[in-house]
Image (tube, grey):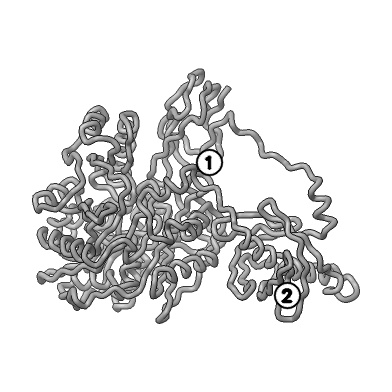
């Protein structure tokens, strides 16, 4: 077995590999760029080597720099994680030439299956059903439009070396095909150093289901069942689960056996994933093979009990797989939520900054439940504009799907994250959505259920009543403390009233509260709700029991009440005396400023190009400029017809969020 391995990656996957290596008694080497000097993976590793400036194309994906770090530290093997150099055959070749083991598949398998164009041709030759498309290289946007018309809209424009949603665009017409081709090409060159593009038919109403395979160098190969990855946004997975709620045993077996046969046909070893598009009749079509560890591998580990990273290391060291296909059963159900530094209230645009508070739920594993959080950040750390915006992967496990979903809801409720925009509210909304809980979803779930983006959740009446009871009990505790601090004489609890009006989501609830040493009884609408909690004023997380059921809410003090965040809702809750509530009803509402005549930069980013000039008349939907952030290009479009009055930025400018890019008449 290896004594020392280098992890050619960063963030949560580097930390994940270090944990398994440590468990196996193997020393680890981290590499880091300028931006990652104080990163968690650097602190966790036994050694760390600086490899260059912050941009990945000057550090993490420069093969010579990684090879130099290997030479400096004497590492015997390299785990590439995912992204970066994980599917780069030249990197595998360089390692082989240096006598260093690659904890991944052979160079030939990477070349055959890691390239999406080549892998499709091999699948077709092996009589595997594939999605229709054009597998040749595409020279320019004109050819992309021509091919798109031949394949038939809608089409998917994809980077051959792509992954993680980068270099992908869906086009429904010639204009989108032309724009999508150029953006995909630019993103592919920036993220992977390979700008080859291909086009395939976009299958409407599909499900994205993938099979995890594992093979050794002794001819043994197995599949570790499937993962459902249909909850996607901009072709990037957001929620994954294992197993799929859609597959039956017969389809699962057929997909698994086909995946193993394909892997063996190319001499594959190590962990890999075969991805399929599955239609409503459970017909499945080969999409691509990822010749690396997947981001969503934890859910497979949770339902099989197999440490995939450990098996990758053992296979690379020449060991045989310790189990056969018949040994791999499905145990329970697992969910994974990808926590991204993206602001859901700004159309999920990237957010950067410092994590002023980062408190994930406690990790645990029992016979009936498990909570796991794979992360690469710590409180006080910086989210950089240079890399993928994923902060953590929160996973839960339970004996069945409904319980696993409920465990995830509770885990998200208790996940404290402040300082940046993030998608926690959106994730919470997904897990409460009836289409998701029924398992009846497709890859179009987000665009169908959130067509206008995400602007928060409106809580139902019963939930509002529970929150009203909780906040009036919390307000009473805060008022008692306030009277004590003020030094007022007499019985502090007696001085705090019993009648309060709670206002939230445009409705008001008259309440009467009676407290005792263990909690409080709150009367709302003729019903008494028992509230119990050990919350103290100032705590940002309140864990309560309301009417016998748990309630976990994030709270912050505001004038006359609380800001409450719960299950995708972000609301102001005011707790007032009856007289205060009467006067509040007479107040004039303050309106937000009018920004309709400005194009504001929606996130910190780099202006790639400006598409218009001062004096131009623009139409609704017309491209105005392109902004790049975290290696993703975002085209900003006109919301309505107008005339450009002034342009305040130029290509190459780095702008802060809400900076004015241009003004309109």
Seen from the viewer's position, the closer of residues 414 and 644 is: 414
Q: Residue at x 41, y 74 (%)?
A: 398
- Judged from the image, the secondary structure of the residue bearing numbered disc 2 is strand
Look at the image and tell me in which quarter the N terminus lies.
Answer: bottom left
Residue lying at the far top of the rendered structure: 615
Q: Secondary structure at mark 1?
A: loop
Q: Is residue 133 above or below residue 126?
A: above
CB contact under 8 Å: marks 1 and 2? no
Which residue does the image show at 60% across and 54% down from the upper left?
Answer: 570
Dot 1: within a 10 Å radius of its alpha carbon, few (fewer than 14), some, or many (20 or more) residues?
A: some
> In this rendering, which labeled residue sits more in front, label 1 or label 2?
2
| Numbered circle sitting on residue 520 | 2
**Residue 12 placement, left or right of 509:** left
**From this viewpoint, is residue 103 visible?**
no
Q: Is residue 165 left or right of residue 533?
A: left
Q: Nearer the viewer, residue 525 or 636?
A: 525
The residue that disc 1 covers is: 656
Residue 576 in which image quadrant: bottom right
Res 12 quadrant in image? bottom left
């Amino acid at each position: 077995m290896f004594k020392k391995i280098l992890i050619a990656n960063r963030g949560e996957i580097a930390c994940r590999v270090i944990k398994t290596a440590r468990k196996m008694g193997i020393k680890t080497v981290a590499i880091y760029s300028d931006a990652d000097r104080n990163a968690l993976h650097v602190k966790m590793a036994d050694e760390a080597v600086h490899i260059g400036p912050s941009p990945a194309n000057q550090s993490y994906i420069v093969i010579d720099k990684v090879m130099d770090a290997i030479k400096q530290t004497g590492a015997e093997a390299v785990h590439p994680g995912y992204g970066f150099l994980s599917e780069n055959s030249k990197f595998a070749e360089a390692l082989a030439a240096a006598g260093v083991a690659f904890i991944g598949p052979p160079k030939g398998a990477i070349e055959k299956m890691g390239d999406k164009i080549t892998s499709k041709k091999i699948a077709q030759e092996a009589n595997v059903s594939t999605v229709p498309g054009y597998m040749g290289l595409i020279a320019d946007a004109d050819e992309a439009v021509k091919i798109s018309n031949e394949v038939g809209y809608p089409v998917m424009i994809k980077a051959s070396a792509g992954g993680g949603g980068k270099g992908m665009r869906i086009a429904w017409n010639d204009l989108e095909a032309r724009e999508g081709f150029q953006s995909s090409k630019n993103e592919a060159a920036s993220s992977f150093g390979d700008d080859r593009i291909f086009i395939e038919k976009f299958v409407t109403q599909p499900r994205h289901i993938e099979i995890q395979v594992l093979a050794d160098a002794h001819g043994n190969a197995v599949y570790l069942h499937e993962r459902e990855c249909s909850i996607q946004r901009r072709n990037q997975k957001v929620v994954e689960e294992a197993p799929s709620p859609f597959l039956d045993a017969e389809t699962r077996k057929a997909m698994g056996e086909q995946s193993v046969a394909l892997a063996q046909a190319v001499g594959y070893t190590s962990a890999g994933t075969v991805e399929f598009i599955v239609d409503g009749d459970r017909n499945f079509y080969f999409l691509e093979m990822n010749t690396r560890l997947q981001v969503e591998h934890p859910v497979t580990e949770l339902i099989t009990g197999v440490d995939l990273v450990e098996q990758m290391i053992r296979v690379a060291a020449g060991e045989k797989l310790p189990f056969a296909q018949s040994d791999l059963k499905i145990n329970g159900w697992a969910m994974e939520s990808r926590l991204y530094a993206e602001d859901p209230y700004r159309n999920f645009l990237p957010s950067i900054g410092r994590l002023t508070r980062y408190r994930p739920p406690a990790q645990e594993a029992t016979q009936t439940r498990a909570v796991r959080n794979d992360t690469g950040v710590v409180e006080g750390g910086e989210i950089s504009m240079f890399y993928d915006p994923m902060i953590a992967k929160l996973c839960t496990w339970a004996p069945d799907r409904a319980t696993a979903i409920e465990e995830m809801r509770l885990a998200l409720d208790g996940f404290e994250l402040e300082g940046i925009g993030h998608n926690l509210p959106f994730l919470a909304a997904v897990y409460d959505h009836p289409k998701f809980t029924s398992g009846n979803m497709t890859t179009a779930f987000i665009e169908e259920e959130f067509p206008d983006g995400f602007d928060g959740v409106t809580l139902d009446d019963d939930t509002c009543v529970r929150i009203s009871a909780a906040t009036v009990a919390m307000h009473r505790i805060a008022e008692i403390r306030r009277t004590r601090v003020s030094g007022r004489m007499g019985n502090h609890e007696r001085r705090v009233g019993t009648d309060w009006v709670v206002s939230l989501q445009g409705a008001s609830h008259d309440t009467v509260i009676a407290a005792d040493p263990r909690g409080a009884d709150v009367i709302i609408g003729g019903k008494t709700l028992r509230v119990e909690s050990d919350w103290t004023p100032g705590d940002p997380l309140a864990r309560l029991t309301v009417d016998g059921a748990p309630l976990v809410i994030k709270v912050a003090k505001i004038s006359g009440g609380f800001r409450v965040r719960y299950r995708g809702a972000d609301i102001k809750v005011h707790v007032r005396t009856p007289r205060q509530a009467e006067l509040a009803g007479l107040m004039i509402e303050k309106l937000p400023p009018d920004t309709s005549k400005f194009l504001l930069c929606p996130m910190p980013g780099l202006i790639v190009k400006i598409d218009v000039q001062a004096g131009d008349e623009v139409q609704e939907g017309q491209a105005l400029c392109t902004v790049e952030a975290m290696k993703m290009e975002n085209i900003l479009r006109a919301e309505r017809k107008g005339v450009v009055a002034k342009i305040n930025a130029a290509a190459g400018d780095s702008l802060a969020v809400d900076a004015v890019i241009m003004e309109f008449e």
